[in-house]
């Protein structure tokens, strides 16, 4: 809440014009129209592509659909009962959380290291920044195909390199013990670009004079990193954490291309099982049920992160 | 100031208007050609023609061959313009079709694989081929009756088989010879495959690598004469129960696992292409693949080794009990298109069924000809002499027909929940291969799960 107030204060222009408006109701009306005009395109697009599907999906979760996806009959909470009694439900939740734990901290950590290493004015740093940010330009589909080739059990580069150093080939995607790990590695690489860019931007926003005065006071580089960089970067890290967790919980493309949820459902993340029910089996009711449950989980998790995380975040 | 604000308001209102107008004209454009298919003269087709949209799932060499044939058809006359669209694999294509059915954006001709017969019929949006056949007394007798049989239900032909295939076992004749096996006497039974694999394995090589594909598993069960679902394999009424936990299935899973555990079979998971790659790079001596992969195998092995083709194996005790069912795909005409378009689609299908077309299709892809007259054409005779591997599929089907004698097992299952059933079938195999469950446990559980899905499905398709 404190943050909201800060945000309000940080928009002095608007609030001053508001007080002026009070005496001129006509202006107020025009201002309001203009204001609504400004937000209207967003509202229309969001309603069409987010809110309407969202409510439609809640509606569908109480129905059964025919092979074409048309509503056939009302089944009440049966879809929910079926989902919660399905032992695959817990398994798929477990895999999704494991995947989040594997990818999010590691991804942020690597991106942070790279960002700190490249955040200086040395020659050639621009080039490294460009290279590290590059994965952001790749779509999930393209990245997955590239990694599918790398992971290929007989002709893939990864196994070739392993064999060169005398290690036996790994069945990256067909061994149930490895599959989730393999996809996590690929996902960390894929998410690196975005994390890196955001963290780098955060680093560049830290004023140089803070570093300078710290240096004059005789602080070592480790002290500077832990006492200045990290606290001042904490809002950025927090932001990256929130979006990474949401991204990880919603991951789908790489699973669809690389493993199709297998082997033995060892990579059957929640969104993949949703896709499978809704768009392969055409059970939109069951799919929508999963979508709604996932929504609730994400909202809860994000709320918890804000509750716990906000206290540790240092806003300037 | 006031003028400025008015200006802003005005600009925004006009922006919104443009947005709405833009949207509505966009949808008008999108719906017009599909809602009104015979009006396509102005838009897409070059001549005054009926446009027939043809969704297919033929990639690679096979796709090029098909599109070439369609181009020939388009050039041969001016009344019909066929627009082929590659929609990815059969499963993807079926998903897209289902999504399209509530609008009119779908195809007039839909290519679908055999196992999708159930889902296709249950959409209730297909115009049975039988209607077109009856209307003009089209002569079906020149076509292979056995292949037609797979697509007949209650004496009605639902789809026209186009790319018929069977599952084949491919083997490396050079590797067989090097291992002291007779390259012209491939193994026929589970037991023989295991024995041959034992001899082929070693030195980083494996006797075999079979992709964990539900199609292969289904065929292994079918060649033993067993049905996959009840109600006459779903042909005498909606199937209500999965029969995946029969002894035939348990035997197959047990044998497969034994091969992997003994180190004779390289398990590369569900990706069939990986097993083919391993075969072509001479890492494994045998692999499974549809006849449609024949051309790819011959091309890939050229200059490296000689490819042999064999019947798919069965347990020794089950010799003569059954045979492969017809795989591959067929063409459906969709009934949500105007009559002229449906009729035009029928003309296209008739063209593709001509002996010359089928001959061309056969020797360029490996899918065997459905028109029996094609086998007498000189180009086919010549191709068969050069590549005797092409004949294996035909012989295998002939044996199958003899053994099956019109049984429902041999015709293959008709099942609405086929996509889910296939996932469950391969998962059961994965569980067995990874020691998570015994074959019996895994199959009991799989059968139960499929039955549950069937029950749910049947509730929605009354």
Image (tube, rainbow, N blue to C red):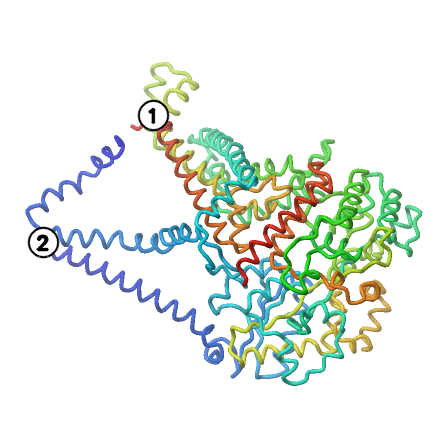
Q: Hey, which residue is sitting farthest top in the picture?
A: A218
Label 2 SS? helix
Q: Nearer the viewer, residue A237 or A211?
A: A237
Q: Nearer the viewer, residue A82 or A24?
A: A82
Work out which quarter of the rendered image holds the N terminus of chain A and state it. Answer: top left
Location of residue B362 (image quadrant): bottom right
User: In this figure, which residue is indicated by the disc labeled 1?
Assistant: A311
User: In this figure, which residue is indicated by the disc labeled 2?
Assistant: A26
Location of residue B299 (image quadrant): bottom right
Question: Residue A22, position in %: x, y?
Answer: 8, 45
Examine the rendering and report whether any part of residue B309 can be seen: no
In percent of the image, x 63 and y 84: which residue is there?
B135
B145 in relation to A130, above or below: below
Question: Residue B131, position in %: x, y?
Answer: 62, 79
Q: Hey, which residue is sitting farthest left in the picture?
A: A23
Location of residue B291 (image quadrant): bottom right
Q: Are marks 1 and 2 in contact (CB under 8 Å)?
A: no
Question: Which chain letter goes with mark 1?
Answer: A
Label 1 SS? helix
Number of other residues with Cα within 10 Å of mark 1, as a class: few under 14, some 14 to 19, many 20 or more: few
B291 in relation to A232, above or below: below
* Label 1 to label 2: alpha-carbon separation: 44 Å
Is A13 left, or right, of B166 in this rendering? left
Question: Residue B165, position in %: x, y?
Answer: 74, 64
Question: Residue B334, position in %: x, y?
Answer: 56, 72
Q: Nearer the viewer, residue B90 or A124?
A: B90
Work out which quarter of the rendered image holds the C terminus of chain A and state it. Answer: top left
Q: Earlier in the sequence, mark 1 or mark 2?
A: 2
In percent of the image, x 72 and y 66: which residue is there?
B164
């Amino acid at each position: 809440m404190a943050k909201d107030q800060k945000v309000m204060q940080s928009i002095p222009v608007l609030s001053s014009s508001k007080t002026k408006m009070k005496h001129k109701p006509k202006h107020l009306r025009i201002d309001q129209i203009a204001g609504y005009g400004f937000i209207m395109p967003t509202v229309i697009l969001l309603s069409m592509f987010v809110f309407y599907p969202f409510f439609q999906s809640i509606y569908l979760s109480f129905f059964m659909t025919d092979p074409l996806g048309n509503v056939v009959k009302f089944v009440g909470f049966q879809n929910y009962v079926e989902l919660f009694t399905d032992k695959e439900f817990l398994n798929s939740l477990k895999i999704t959380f494991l995947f989040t734990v594997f990818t999010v901290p590691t991804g942020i950590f690597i991106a942070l290291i790279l960002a700190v290493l490249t955040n200086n004015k040395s020659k050639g740093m621009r080039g490294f920044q460009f290279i590290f940010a590059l994965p952001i330009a790749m779509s999930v589909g393209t990245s997955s195909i590239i990694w599918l080739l790398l992971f290929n059990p007989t002709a893939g580069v990864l196994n070739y390199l392993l064999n060169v150093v005398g290690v036996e080939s790994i069945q990256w995607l067909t061994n149930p013990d490895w599959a989730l790990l393999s996809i996590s590695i690929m996902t960390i690489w894929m998410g690196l670009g975005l994390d890196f860019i955001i963290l780098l931007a955060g680093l560049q926003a830290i004023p140089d004079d803070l570093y300078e005065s710290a240096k004059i006071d005789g602080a070592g580089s480790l002290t500077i990193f832990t006492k200045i960089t990290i606290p001042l970067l904490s809002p950025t890290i927090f932001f990256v954490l929130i979006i990474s967790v949401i991204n990880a919980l919603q991951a789908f493309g790489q699973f669809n291309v690389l493993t199709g949820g297998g082997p033995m459902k060892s990579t059957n993340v929640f969104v993949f099982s949703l896709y499978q029910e809704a768009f392969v089996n055409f059970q939109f009711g069951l799919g929508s049920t999963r979508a709604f449950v996932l929504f609730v989980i994400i909202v809860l998790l994000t709320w918890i992160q804000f509750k716990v995380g906000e206290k540790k975040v240092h806003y300037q | 100031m006031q003028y400025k604000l008015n200006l802003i308001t005005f600009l925004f209102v006009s922006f919104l208007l443009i947005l709405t107008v833009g949207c509505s004209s966009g949808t008008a454009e999108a719906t017009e050609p599909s809602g009104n298919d015979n009006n396509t003269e102005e838009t897409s087709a070059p001549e005054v023609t009926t446009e027939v949209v043809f969704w297919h799932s033929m990639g690679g060499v096979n796709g090029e061959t098909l599109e070439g044939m369609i181009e020939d058809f388009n050039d041969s006359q001016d009344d019909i313009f066929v627009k082929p669209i590659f929609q990815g694999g059969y499963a993807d294509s079926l998903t897209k079709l289902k999504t399209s059915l509530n609008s009119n954006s779908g195809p007039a001709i839909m290519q679908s694989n055999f196992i999708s017969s159930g889902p296709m019929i249950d959409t209730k949006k297909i115009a049975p081929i039988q209607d077109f056949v009856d209307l003009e007394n089209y002569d079906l007798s020149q076509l292979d009756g056995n292949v037609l049989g797979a697509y007949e239900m209650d004496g009605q032909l639902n789809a026209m088989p186009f790319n018929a295939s069977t599952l084949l076992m491919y083997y490396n004749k050079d590797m067989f010879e090097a291992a002291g096996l007779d390259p012209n006497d491939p193994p026929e039974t589970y037991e023989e495959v295991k024995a041959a694999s034992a001899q082929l394995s070693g030195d980083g090589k494996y006797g075999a690598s079979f992709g964990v594909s539900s199609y292969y598993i289904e065929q292994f069960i079918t060649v033993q004469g067993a049905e996959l679902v009840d109600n006459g394999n779903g042909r005498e009424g909606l199937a209500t129960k999965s029969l995946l936990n029969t002894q035939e299935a348990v035997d197959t899973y047990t044998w497969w696992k034994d091969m992997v555990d003994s180190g004779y079979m390289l398990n590369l998971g569900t990706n069939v292409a990986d097993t083919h790659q391993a075969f072509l790079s001479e890492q494994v001596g045998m692999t499974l693949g549809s006849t449609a992969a024949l051309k790819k195998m011959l091309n890939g092995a050229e200059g490296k080794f000689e490819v042999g083709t064999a019947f798919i194996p069965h347990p020794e005790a089950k010799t003569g009990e059954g045979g492969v069912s017809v795989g591959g795909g067929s063409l459906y005409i969709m009934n949500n298109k105007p009559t002229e378009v449906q009729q035009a689609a029928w003309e296209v299908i008739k063209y593709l069924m001509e002996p010359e077309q089928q001959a061309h299709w056969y020797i360029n892809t490996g899918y065997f000809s459905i028109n029996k007259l094609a086998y007498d054409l000189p180009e086919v005779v010549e191709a068969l002499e050069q590549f005797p591997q092409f004949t294996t599929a035909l012989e295998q089907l002939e044996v199958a027909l003899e053994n099956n004698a019109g049984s429902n097992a041999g015709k293959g299952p008709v099942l609405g929940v086929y996509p889910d059933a296939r996932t469950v079938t391969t998962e059961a195999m994965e569980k067995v291969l990874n020691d998570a469950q015994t074959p019996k446990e895994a199959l009991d559980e799989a059968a139960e799960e499929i039955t549950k899905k069937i029950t749910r499905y049947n509730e929605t398709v009354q």
